[in-house]
Amino acid sequence: MRSLLLEVIITKIAAKRMKRRNKKRILTNKYHEDWSSISSLPLESMRGRYCAACRKKTHRSKRKQEKKHFADWSSLPRGIVEMIAEKLTFVDWLSMSKVCMSWNAILGEEHPCWQRHGFPCLLVSGQRNKETRTCISILENRVWEFELPEACGKYCWGSFRGWLIMVKCLDNFHLEVNLLNPFSGSQIILPSIWNFYHKMVLSGLPYKNNFICMLLHSHCRELAFWSTGANSWRKYSELTGEPFEDAVFCNGSFYLLDGGFNIWQIDVQSIYSSINGGDDSGTLSKIETRFHEVKRPEIFQLQEWVGLQNRRTNQILRYLVESCGELLLVCRYFNPNQDAVLETQKFEVYALNFCELSWKKVKDLGDQMIFLGRCCSTSFSAKELGVGVRNSLYFCNDPTTPWWNEWDSDHLKGILSRFGFNRTNVSHWGIFTLGNEDGEPFCFHGDIDSWTYTWFTAPSWWCNRNIPPIQSK
C-alpha cells in the first residue's frame, strides 16, 4: 500500500515536470519557430552594433587606466614647457612641438624675447621677376617655394637673421632699399641710395627701436648711416684710403676690414649721438672711430705673400664674421682656371687677439658652424641645432671681388652657357671642414655664370609651423 502511494506521487511529479517542459517548448517555438527565415542583414547589423558597443566599452576602460597611470602632458604649465624647450637642441625642440596641440601653440608663437636662433637656409638668386622664391634647407636636404609677392622686381642684397635686404633699381644711379621679413610680411622702407655701395650691415634686428644700418662705399672709405625715424642717410667721409672690404657688428661696435688686415672700430653710441645732435645737412662729422693696426697673419708676413699678390692666378676674398663674441677673419683662396669656373682651393680662419693686436690662426672652430656670404655671414652652434657638421664652413659661389652687385652684372647672366661652356661640373654651395689639410686636396668649382645665393635664418616659430620633425644625423 505504501509503495503504491509512493509510485502515484512520483508519477504526478513527473507529469508536472513534463507539462512545464512542454510549456517552454511552446513558447520557444512561438517566437523562434521561423528563425531560419529571418534575413541575414538585420543579424549582421545587430552583431555590428554589439561589437561596436564592446569596443567602446573597452576603449573607455583603457582611457580610465591611462588616466590613472599616465600624466596629461597637455596640462603642463606654460613656464615649464618653455623652460624644457630652451634646454633642447633645435631638432629635439621641433619634435617636442609636435607632441600635442597645446605645446605646438606655445612653441609656435612669435615671441622674440625667448625664441631660438632659428634654422639656416639659402635663398636662390636670379628670380627677380617672380612672386615666388626658391629656398634650400641644406641641413635637412629640402627645397621649397616661398610666396614673396613683396619681393617681385627686387634683388636680394643680403640678410640679417630672418630679414632680407631687398633692392630695386630706380635708374642707373639710384636704388630703392627696404628690409623685408618674409615670414611675418613686415617691411621697413629705407631712403633711396646712390648705386655706389657694395654692402649693408645692421646693428640689430629691425623690430627693435634703436638699430642702425651702415653702408660701405665701393670706391672709397665713405660710409653712410641710417637710424630709426631718420628721413635720409647721413654720410661720413672723414676716412681716406681704399674702400673697406667687409664689416660686421660685434659687442656694440661696427668693425671694418681694410686692405692691410687692419681694423677700424666705430662705436654705435657715438653714431646715435652724432645723428641726434647734428644738423640736416646729410653728413656726419663727429663719430668716435678707433684704428687698430693689426699684425698680419704669419703666412702673409713671408715672401710667399708677395708671390701670391704678384701671381694673377691666385686671389683672396676675406670675410669678417662674429662668432660667440669673437671677431673672426676667414680667408678664401681662389684660382680662376681656363674652364670658366671659380675654383676655391682652401680656407683659413683667424681670430683677432685684441690684447696683442694680431691675427691668430684658428685650427678648430669647436662646436661652431660658419655660414659665409656677401652681406650675410653668420655663425651657428652644431650642438644647439642638433644637425650639421661642426668645425665647418658653409659657403656659396661668391665672386672674387666684394665690390660687385647682382644688378650690376644681371646682363651677363648665362653668357658662358650661350658661348657653349660646360656647366655640369659647377656647384652653388659647398662645405669645408677645418683641420683637413692632410687629407685629400680640397677643390670647389663655383658657378660664375649665376649670382651667389643668400644665407638667411628661418625663425623658430615659422619652422614649428612649416617644417616636419628632422632626423638628426
Image (tube, helix red, strand yellow):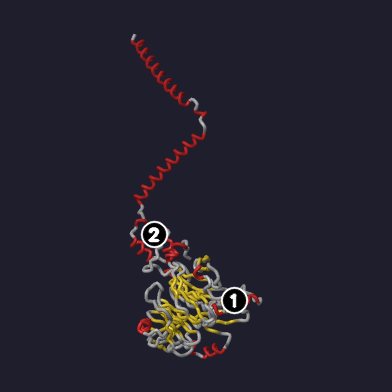
Q: Residue at x 57, y 88 (%)?
A: 311
Q: Which residue is mark 2?
A: 103
The percent coordinates of residue 374 (x first, y second) are 50, 78
* Residue neighbourhood size for the residue with mark 1, other residues' Cα within 10 Å, grouped as few (<14), some (14–19), many (≥20): some
**Local secondary structure at mark 2:** helix
Foreground tag (1 vs 2): 1
Determine the residue positioned at 49% across, 36% down: 44
Amino acid type, callout 2: Trp
* Left or right: 115 as drawn, with respect to 122: left
Task: Give the secondary structure at mark 1.
Answer: loop
Please state the horizontal and vertical placement of residue 137, each as a whole percent of the image: 50, 68
Q: What mark, if any, has residue 351 been given in the picture?
A: none
Residues under numbered marks 1 and 2 in contact, where contact means CB atoms less than 8 Å apart: no
The label on residue 413 is 1
How packed is label 2: few (under 14 Cα within 10 Å), some, or many (20 or more)?
many
Earlier residue among tags 1 and 2:
2
236 versus 99 height, above or below? below
**Location of residue 21 in the rendering, given as x and y in whole percent from the top left corner:** 42, 21
Q: Nearer the viewer, residue 289 or 436?
A: 289
